[in-house]
Amino acid sequence: MQAPMELTISPRLAKNIRRNVKERIIELILMLAALTAVATTFAIVGVLLYESVSFFKTVSVVEFFTATEWTPLFEDAHYGIMPLVSGTLTTSAIALAVAVPIGTITAIFLSEFASHKARETVKPILELLVGVPTVVFGYFALFFVTPLLQSVYPELPSFNMLSAGIVMGVMIIPYIASLSEDAMRAVPMSMREGSYAMGATRFQTAIKVVAPAATSGIVAAYILAVSRAVGETMVVAVAAGQQPTLTFNPLEGAATITAYIVQVAMGDLPHGSIGYQSIFAAGLVLMVMTLSFNIIGHWIRKKYREHY
Amino acid sequence: MEHKASVIENLAEVRAMIKRHKRNDTLFAVIGLCALMLGLITLMLLFWQLIADGYPKFTIDFLTEFPSRRAGQAGLLSAWVGSFLVMSVTFLTAVPVGVAAGLYLEEYAPKNWFTDLIEINVSNLAGVPSIIYGLLALGLFVYILDLGQSILTAGLTLGLLILPIVIVSTREAIRAIPVSIREAAYGVGATKWQVVYDHVFKYSYGGILTGVIIGMARALGETAPIITIGALTFIAFLPPSPITAEPPFLNFEWLSSGFTVMPIQMFNWLSRPDHAFHINAAATGALIIIVTLLMNGTAIWLRYKIRKNIKW
Amino acid sequence: MANINTAIKAEARDLNFFYSNGARALKGISMPLYENKITALIGPSGCGKSTFLRCFNRMHDLYPGNKYEGQIVMYPDNTNVLDAGVDPIEVRMRISMVFQKPNPFPKSIYENVAYGLRVRGENNKRIMDDKVEEALKGAALWNEVKDRLHDLAFNLSGGQQQRLCIARALATDPEIMLFDEPTSALDPIATANIEELMVELRSKLTILVVTHNMQQAARVSDYTAYMYLGELIEYDDTDRIFTNPGRKETEDYITGKFG
Amino acid sequence: MANINTAIKAEARDLNFFYSNGARALKGISMPLYENKITALIGPSGCGKSTFLRCFNRMHDLYPGNKYEGQIVMYPDNTNVLDAGVDPIEVRMRISMVFQKPNPFPKSIYENVAYGLRVRGENNKRIMDDKVEEALKGAALWNEVKDRLHDLAFNLSGGQQQRLCIARALATDPEIMLFDEPTSALDPIATANIEELMVELRSKLTILVVTHNMQQAARVSDYTAYMYLGELIEYDDTDRIFTNPGRKETEDYITGKFG
Amino acid sequence: ADKIIKIDGSSTVYPITEAVAEEFQKAKGVKVTVGESGTGGGFKKFCRGETDISDASRPISQKEIDACKEGGVQFIELPIAYDALTVVVNAKNDWVKQLTVAELKKVWEPGSKIKNWKQLNATYPDKAMNLYGPGTASGTFDYFTEAVNGKSKASRTDYTPSEDDNVLVQGVSGNLGGMAYFGMAYYEENTDKLKAVPVVAKEGGKPVLPSEATVMDGTYQPLSRPIFIYVNATSAAFKPEVKAFVNFYLENAPKLVKEVKYVPLPKEDYDAVKTHFKAMKPGTGFNGTSEVGIKITDLLSRIK
Ligand SMILES: Nc1ncnc2c1ncn2[C@@H]1O[C@H](COP(=O)(O)OP(=O)(O)OP(=O)(O)O)[C@@H](O)[C@H]1O
Ligand SMILES: Nc1ncnc2c1ncn2[C@@H]1O[C@H](COP(=O)(O)OP(=O)(O)OP(=O)(O)O)[C@@H](O)[C@H]1O
Ligand SMILES: [Mg+2]
Ligand SMILES: [Mg+2]
Ligand SMILES: O=P([O-])([O-])[O-]
């Protein structure tokens, strides 16, 4: 009985080995693909750090973070990143002030008030806002929103953070609305039924049960919106003015980190010059900012995931 | 009877209260509708403005003419061909890598710190501003790898930019496939790769495609990273054709060719002194939005179709 | 156990129900709910027990396209709960419900119980505290949670969560309470607790409970209704149903020959 | 029905199983599977029936952290299925499985049945056609689907889908077939069909079936094992188990006093 | 591979080169790319040998000459038109009638603290002065700082810089107190929103508005300037298509320069430039410094 069995099993074993080798190779290839993501991050950080290191050989880190002027391309060069940071933060804050309330209300409306059909039609249309090239929004801010604001407040300069921020806010409404709506829809129906069964109205259910239950998802949406706002380029480059100014006054114009990078990149800065390095140093600051937002968002999602 | 009276009295009170509460419902519905309309109206306004400004250029000539110093004759030919070629490179790089990465993370990756690292990486990359990708491309592709300001550089840059989108949508599509299908396949003796390829991938590619299209639509409108690699140029010719008459019939010279893309051409026209060019720019903007709309529409339609056809 | 003198609290009259896909899930059901009694609904899976129960508090209104036909009348005020003119919110304030799977809100224990009161516009802290305590006591949960009222409700065990949901329903003094398989997600000990609780609650209100567990129906209910394929096959005293059912189908089901 | 002369096809020897969370779901189970017989596994929900069944084709390997202890030996080759050196894919080629809910692939009927053959590298169309036909006949589905082999499998009814899954498992000539509550998602008529089929299949292979329906176990199986809390309480001829169980627990379960 | 003529550099010169490139492509079917990285950016590439021709709105600087030497690039300097840097204010600005170079300097010099029109001239209203100007990689910036502040690249830094002149137009047209400078072409297209300011070259001189006439007769000083293309000498010698392109450029310049709203050189100057190109004489007539108000023929004759 034993002997013939051996015969039938050994070719099978050989086949097993061949199969296993093939499986390993495939897994390795797939893993390499997944590692591309890691490699990209390392490449980004590497490139930014590499050029920034040269930059910081010329410029002291202390000056970089404390000086109040940013004029690396002028003869009288100053290297204080703060004016760019203030511009970035101000425009982002305005954008969020617009997008967070409107986006959240829209999300609640779509998820709890609109009919299924309305939601399924409106949401994709809203998401189209994401697909509009941001240059278009930039010129929309400069040629449409700014004059509109000027008709209310004539003292407003042509380049101001207010109009850029507002348009940027409108631009990121869909992110907040769509992601928050997803989060609210993920709240199990049993939770809603529980509330309605208590005699709650739609509004009460939405505000007191659904939104709190979806908090983590909603906050994660906000965080994503923050990093979008901070990283948005063309709108601010076109509409906020490109003059680095240390100000948090939305009625003034100012440059953001992104606007500075793209402004410099538009001319062909010679590789190796301090100006070339300065955009990488600015990029590094931007990267650190968005990275920290992303990590906070990741942490929030992880911490609160699947509570029901 | 006393009981009955109290019940009814109580009811009247309850009714009054409900009426009050329902007023909030209505109020919020109105506010919500306004909030929603704000986004929609902005989009409409933008779109309408572009159409109104650009409609004189809605002609075939606009698509078949090269850019020109005369606004009236200027066309989009080199820009849309450039966009198409750049998008092809983007597609060919981001999709295989992204799908493979998604399959790995969802089906293969053990749960340990290493895959956690990859996960955090992917979600971070999704939030990295596009201009940073531009800097990466400038530092790495243009200078270190010396690829120049070419279609290849732009395609790779945008490919990296949408990679996280492809990975995430792949993973989501895969997650929709029930365990029971996997177990069924394993149950008849399939190997891991057979399960992954024959089932997981094949049943999810519709969902993957949806994500890919949305990513591509986004890449199509990207301006900042392309400017950053320094591609703001007058190009009034087409790159060498990828297909040739003689063997080997394929030609890769176009990859290293200079190029322009639609948003860049639009940007270029907008910065002209002559206002006639702004009409071209508006028409280009409208065209980009229309293409984006079509792409997103396709994605939505696909998603709808998949949901309808496959019910697990 | 049955008592002919008991008042009727509510009554289904020739009730039909259609889901939005057109499926007729209830077929001409007429049945009383006696006041301060427990009525159990039994029947094989898919026979329409949940559907019937959820008509009482108009839960089906939450999903578009569902249609009621017939009446559910509440006494003593003779309100037809299903009447289009009657606000479902009003109905739900009078008839509360406990679900199959415990579904506390992602809030503190206190806030969960207080929710119904808040929904009713109550804001007085003193009153609220009292009511919450009373409800938690009524749900036999007070002793276990009184020291951690502001803990998240999710941190309770399954059985405790279900009792919390009962407390939540209780806090607003409903006239009728609906239970849809309230113990099916619970272990035997938690199940016994809930059953005991239902029996206690009977003195305060009227109860309609769906269960797939015949032993449970026999243990807790005063009246039992057996449903099959959307129809009410038999309705009677629980004792009679379990000892001497009038219909062959009921007997087959109860003795396990079928299902 | 039992027959001492029957050969043993496979045998669990002091089998323990631990889920990745450390829970010990099987506790020292030893039990034979007789060749060309149907063995039924019964027991209350959560007792470990599915866990035990899934050990036979190493399904637990799909999820990291699960741990087997002990052996499942297959005869006549004496292979310990659980041995780390034995390729689970090889095991699954010899022992196939039918799941609780029909789970056809979203492919054509033909492709569903042919899949096991393709996985084995079979590509010859002629051979494939023959095998598919044979399997579908074996699963008593051929007559119903022979004219629409290239239809999507999802278009079949639940019972047909389950028979398709049986055909899929059958196409590769397994030595043992595992059924995990194969009829729990089906209506009574489809259930009867599947039961009949299992009895027919017995002549070709060895069957292990999990069921929560005691009537079903009594109807189809030759041997029955009663499990409780991860332990094998009793194993015997089906007739003996149902008429004269050796253990009090078994009797309580079978007569519905418990569970 | 296909023949491609690569051009980059000044955005001021860009419209002219673009027009020539377009016509040339139509006529000869040779591919031409024209970038606009600014004069400085263009020279960087040019001196690395990456481009055949560099557009420039100022003469090549000493640094750039050195870079070209290092890169082994010899160049032929060809003036191709005049441009008038135009100082503009908002069309509704009714107080500025003229500005002297000294006043411009007061506004634009490094460290200037002028933020209000009143600070410049007590008769002007108390109005904030918003400044817009080209980016630092541009020849326009270099030339203006040289001509007004006396030193190339020496400028105050707290103004809104943009490589996109249209953005500057928008800035001034939206601010009553705005002021900017850029090439004349942009002013000509926006006369409804902007007002050009007559410039007084020397204290006590006459205010002069930029126009074709005042540029040609040399009275619009110091802001009118010749603009150039620099041709890689090796390309000109060994790439027939580059040679053909430059010849085509000079042939068609009078017509095309006018069309894109710049001021063409006098005919005899074009003839001189053509001769100069035919002779293929490399080098610059400027010795690496900028000069204000030089004659083309003098310039060409300086190159040995
Ligand atoms: N939303 C729905 N749309 C359409 N049909 C439904 C819906 N919900 C339930 N049904 C159908 O209505 C019938 C009754 O369902 P119901 O949930 O009331 O049964 P049940 O007796 O509560 O069963 P179980 O014991 O499984 O909970 C079933 O045939 C079911 O398939
Ligand atoms: N993936 C898992 N991880 C941890 N414990 C599990 C897992 N799956 C099942 N268990 C536990 O193992 C025990 C046995 O489960 P199993 O599914 O084998 O029971 P069963 O007898 O098949 O029950 P049912 O009749 O409900 O299918 C149960 O206590 C269950 O909670
Ligand atoms: Mg139910
Ligand atoms: Mg099981
Ligand atoms: O682009 P520029 O002409 O100013 O160098």
Image: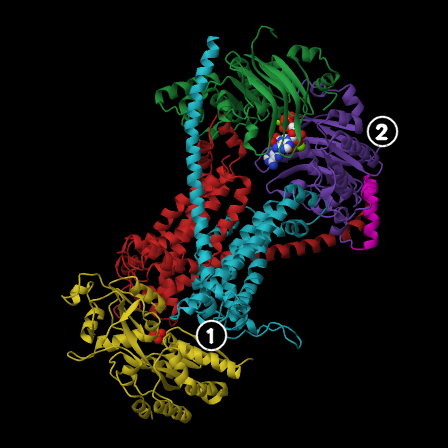
Chain colours: A red, B cyan, C green, D purple, E yellow
Whether D138 is among the magenta residues is: yes
Category of crowding for the residue at label 2, using alpha-carbon neighbours closer than 10 angstroms: few (below 14), some (14–19), many (at least 20): few
Tell me residue C241's x, y (percent): 68, 13
Splitting the image into four quadrants, where does ligand 1 fall? top right
For the residues marked 2 and 1, what is the alpha-carbon distance in whole angstroms? 95 Å
* Circles 2 and 1 on the same subunit: no
Disc sitting over residue D3 in the figure: 2
- Quadrant for residue D23, please give it: top right
- Quadrant for residue C194, please give it: top right
Does E216 sit left or right of E18 as displayed?
A: left
Quick one: which residue is furthest to the left in this view? E122
Proximity of marks 2 and 1: CB atoms separated by less than 8 Å: no
Q: Which residues are magenta?
A: D123-146
Q: Nearer the viewer, residue B176 or C172?
A: C172
Q: Say which element carries label 1.
A: loop
Answer yes or no: is residue C136 visible.
no
Q: Is residue C43 above or below residue B44?
A: above
Disc sitting over residue B68 in the figure: 1
Tell me residue E212's x, y (percent): 31, 81
The subunit letter for the residue under badge 1 reads: B
Category of crowding for the residue at label 1, using alpha-carbon neighbours closer than 10 angstroms: few (below 14), some (14–19), many (at least 20): many
- Quadrant for residue A33, please give it: bottom right
Q: Is residue A35 above or below residue B251?
A: above
